[in-house]
Image: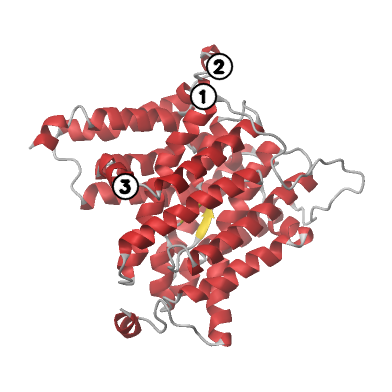
Amino acid sequence: MEKENALKFNYGLNDKPGWLPLALYGIQWFLATMPILLIIGSLVGNLQFDTLTEKTFYTQKLFALIGTALIVQVLWGHRLPIIIGPATVLLVGIIASQSESTASIYTAIITGGALLFALSFTPWLKNLKDLFSPRIVAVILALIAVTLMPTIIDLSFSGVLPPSLKYVFFVVFTIILMISNSLLRGIWKSTVLLWGIVAGTLAYRFLISDWSMPAFPASEENSKTFFLPAFEIEPGVLLAFLFCYVALFINELGSVQAVSQAIRSGDETPRTVRGLRFTGLFNALNGLFGVIGPVDFSMSPGIIMSTGCASRYALIPAGAGLILCALFPGIILFLTSIPESVMGIILLYLMITQLGSSLQMIGTNNLVKNFNDAIVIAFPIMLALVTVFLPGPIVSAIPVLLRPILGNGFVMGVIAVIILEHTLNKKEKKK
């Protein structure tokens, strides 16, 4: 296998680059990893905390844990060059559970991670994979994107710009990101999110004529803690997050298999099992520390091809860099001083790529052969959209125990696609 890798890449999977190339490749992986950490860390911090100190400390913990998870996965987990970051689908769950206690949310994340970890030791893994047809997987990818739309809209049109200018900024900046992603090559393409954050922040601050940087208030009260202060089991929240972990499970399998096949690593099944095992472990660990859980990202093959480096060791400096940043609150505060409008547009860009992956999967796998197939895809997405935009009084009228499920667009969409796929297409499966 190493010979195959050597023919294709400057450095194969298990090659150890010298110190200089290791540092250079590590910086590239670091730059590609950081944007999603900043965006999701800032979003969750803003949702769950009031003070700047607490929000920054949350992102510090996230940087440290993601950096540690990255190094552990590379050395002992799947042992592949794969970016790891906070799971977008868990962000969906957190947003949908805002009315519930933080303790119940992270208890659910701990439980979901522990179940993934336990699942990796059982023979049920293959049976669970077979349950999710390509059509179900494609719909789940789309559901993650569409159910974040209310958050994207709220973020994108916040701030002090005049309403008309907000919309112009939203449209123009989004188009620039799309064009940049299409035209750029190599490391520039891999880090388009980072440059988007930088350019968007500078442009926004220019428009509002405000170049001041945030600072920690000397008298600010905070209750920052390293660990989750209490455990709380809320059945509705727990069940809702278990559906989120179905999507995380699919995401994890897809990311590991995509990179394994791209670099012809061999041993795909054991790598997948180990990757899932450590992803589950770190989800439980992150929940224990009161931060969102991680997952492997599917963008990694593009970075590998553009850099010509398939060495897993090149990700170790990236993980170390994340941990190092976590030690300095001032650095984290500077990195997270992103206007909410820019956050919303970056999140929209990420969800466009997510939805694009879903549509590409539908097309390349010929998943719509008849009208029933189309209904299996269309209805769950429409149900999810209706659910996320339900008026407040309707959501409030749902029984408290069922609200985290019936009021969660993603969960309702997943339930719908599983039921429809295994009923409307039952005859097709028998054939």
Q: Earlier in the sequence, mark 3 or mark 1?
A: 3
Of 140 and 272, nearer the camera is: 272
Query: Mark 3 — residue?
Result: 123
* Amino acid carrying mark 2 in the image: Val
What secondary structure is found at the residue carrying circle 3? loop
Q: Picture coordinates of residue 25 (x, y %)?
A: 52, 77
Q: CA distance from mark 1 to mark 2?
A: 8 Å
**Residue, x 56% and y 18% (percent of image)?**
392
Query: In the picture shown, does residue 26 fall above or below 92?
Result: below
Q: Which mark is residue 400?
A: 2
Q: Which mark is residue 236?
A: 1
Disc number lying in front (3 or 1): 3
Q: Picture coordinates of residue 253 (x, y %)?
A: 36, 53
Q: Earlier in the sequence, mark 1 or mark 2?
A: 1
Left or right: residue 336 versus residue 241 is right
Query: In the picture shown, does residue 393 fall above or below 48?
Result: above
* Amino acid carrying mark 1 in the image: Gly
Of 323 and 95, nearer the camera is: 323
Q: Earlier in the sequence, mark 2 or mark 3?
A: 3
Query: In the picture shown, does residue 184 fall above or below 177?
Result: below
Query: In the picture shown, does residue 55 fall above or below 243?
Result: below
- Residues under numbered marks 3 and 1 in contact, where contact means CB atoms less than 8 Å apart: no
Q: Picture coordinates of residue 118 (x, y %)?
A: 44, 45
Q: Which residue in the rendered view is the most extreme toward the front?
A: 122
Badge 1: how crowded within 10 Å, few (<14), some, or many (20+)?
A: some
